Image (spheres, rainbow, N blue to C red):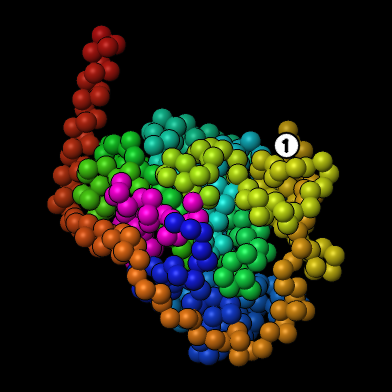
């Protein structure tokens, strides 16, 4: 498939949350008014300062409005809970001071940024579940709970292992998304990127492994949905084992309905054509039919188009391990990448590179209000591969509590067999 702009890519499942609808530059008049009302409401509650610069940018506020279906008071409730949670766990301090090695240990357990983007300019992540075997997860969780790897004080109710996970979400929202936002080789170049696209590989995963991961994945999903709303655009599940249609019924209970509607389960024959409908072949990992040299655990293979816009500094020629974020410099005309965290007990704050801001604030402020309140363009004609993917999700069987009990029983039988084998060997 030839590389082509993203304008022909469908919104997920036809619902009203599909990019770019509801994002800056593509708000209806009513949505624009609700954003203004939300700001005023937050300001009255002492949770927002209009600036300049404002305490929270418009694209962040819009994430909460979209998540709460544009109901201002509901968006406020989620926003307040998130702000309170961030302060109670000192998320800013956590990200600034987390040990780089601990950060990298956590990164290897969760979706990896490939360094590439989909056709709309949204960062592309890869997650291979098979690496999360019970021994790996147990060892990690024990280590995470016994060691505080940052200077942040916590509320005591959020486990350390999950706080480390949220350092990765901070990297998504403060590093990957802002970097992709400054790239103008995409449709809707003035619209900030606040989403991610994910390939989730569930091949070589047993029923027992799925079950053992239940609490690990469910806790992470619940907190992510609560405190990082509307940061996910699509999940492509590939390599689904024969029993996946059965376990899907309880897996999808971990997610809210909007997230479920963004999940595409692909058969082997659907992987290549569907991924190419959303992602240029040069940005798809080779193992999934593309041209990109990228394996799970790799550092990001940064898009050459992104590299062309970067000015490296202080001897850097690539992004280092650990946390980093972008800060405005040169009067807001450029963004500088600052590598943070700690190495061998010493705090790190190193300038890595800089990038020109595509649309500086003074230029953005000149955009006519009518242009920002435009409605979304009509949906494109359906791609057969995309339709097949959607149908695959909708046709998966929904299981009830009886079936969940059967799954638990099967897993218990497998566990007993493993215990008997271990006992026989030791005897």
- Does residue 284 appear in this view? yes
Task: Indicate the secondary structure of the residue bearing disc 1.
Answer: strand
Q: Nearer the viewer, residue 99 or 357?
A: 357
**Within-10-Å neighbours for mark 1: few <14, some 14–19, many 20+:** some
Overall secondary structure of the magenta section: helix
Magenta-tinted stretch: 252-281
426 on left or right of 134: left
Residue at image location 75% in from the left, 73% down from the top: 360
Whether residue 49 is situated above or below residue 354 in the rendered picture: below
Picture mark count: 1
Residue at image location 56% in from the left, 65% down from the top: 194
54 on left or right of 300: right
- Does residue 36 appear in this view? no
Whether residue 38 is situated above or below residue 128 in the rendered picture: below
Residue at image location 58% in from the left, 80% down from the top: 25
The quadrant of the rendering that contains the C terminus is top left
Q: Nearer the viewer, residue 85 or 133?
A: 133
Residue at image location 50% in from the left, 39% down from the top: 296
User: In this figure, which residue is indicated by the disc labeled 1?
Assistant: 343
Was residue 276 drawn as part of the magenta stretch in this picture? yes
Residue 207 appears in which quarter of the rendering? top left
């Amino acid at each position: 498939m030839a590389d082509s702009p993203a304008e022909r890519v469908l919104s997920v499942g036809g619902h009203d949350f599909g990019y770019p609808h509801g994002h800056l530059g593509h708000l209806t008049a009513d949505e624009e008014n609700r954003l203004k009302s939300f700001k005023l409401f937050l300001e009255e509650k002492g949770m927002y300062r209009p600036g300049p610069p404002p305490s929270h940018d418009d694209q962040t506020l819009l994430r909460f409005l979209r998540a709460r279906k544009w109901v201002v008071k509901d968006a406020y409730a989620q926003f307040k809970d998130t702000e309170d949670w961030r302060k109670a766990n000192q998320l800013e301090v956590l990200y600034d001071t987390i040990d780089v090695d601990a950060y990298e240990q956590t990164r290897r357990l969760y979706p990896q940024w490939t360094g590439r983007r989909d056709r709309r300019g949204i960062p592309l992540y890869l997650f291979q579940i098979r690496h999360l075997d019970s021994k790996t997860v147990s060892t990690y969780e024990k280590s995470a709970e016994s060691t505080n790897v940052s200077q942040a004080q916590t509320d005591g109710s959020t486990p350390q292992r999950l706080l480390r996970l949220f350092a990765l979400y901070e990297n998504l929202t403060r590093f990957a998304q802002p970097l992709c936002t400054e790239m103008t080789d995409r449709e809707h170049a003035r619209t900030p990127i606040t989403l991610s696209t994910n390939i989730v590989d569930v091949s070589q995963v047993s029923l027992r492994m799925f079950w053992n991961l239940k609490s690990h994945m469910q806790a992470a999903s619940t907190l992510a949905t609560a405190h990082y709303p509307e940061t996910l655009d699509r999940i492509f599940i590939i390599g689904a084992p024969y029993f996946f249609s059965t376990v899907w019924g309880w897996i999808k209970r971990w997610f809210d309905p909007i997230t479920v509607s963004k999940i595409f389960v692909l058969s082997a024959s659907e992987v290549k054509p569907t991924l190419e409908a959303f992602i240029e072949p040069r940005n798809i990992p080779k193992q999934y039919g593309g041209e990109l040299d990228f394996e799970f655990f790799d550092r990001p293979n940064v898009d050459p188009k992104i590299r062309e816009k970067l000015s490296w500094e202080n001897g850097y020629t690539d992004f280092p391990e650990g946390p980093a974020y972008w800060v405005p410099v040169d009067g807001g005309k450029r963004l500088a990448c600052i590598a943070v965290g700690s190495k061998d007990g010493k705090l790190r704050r190193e300038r890595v590179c800089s990038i020109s801001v595509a649309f500086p604030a003074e230029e953005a402020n000149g955009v006519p209000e009518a242009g920002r309140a435009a409605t979304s363009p009509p949906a494109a004609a359906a791609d057969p591969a995309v339709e097949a993917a959607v149908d695959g999700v909708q046709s998966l069987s929904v299981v009830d509590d009886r079936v969940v009990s059967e799954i638990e029983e099967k897993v218990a039988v497998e566990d007993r067999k493993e215990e008997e084998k271990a006992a026989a060997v030791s005897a």
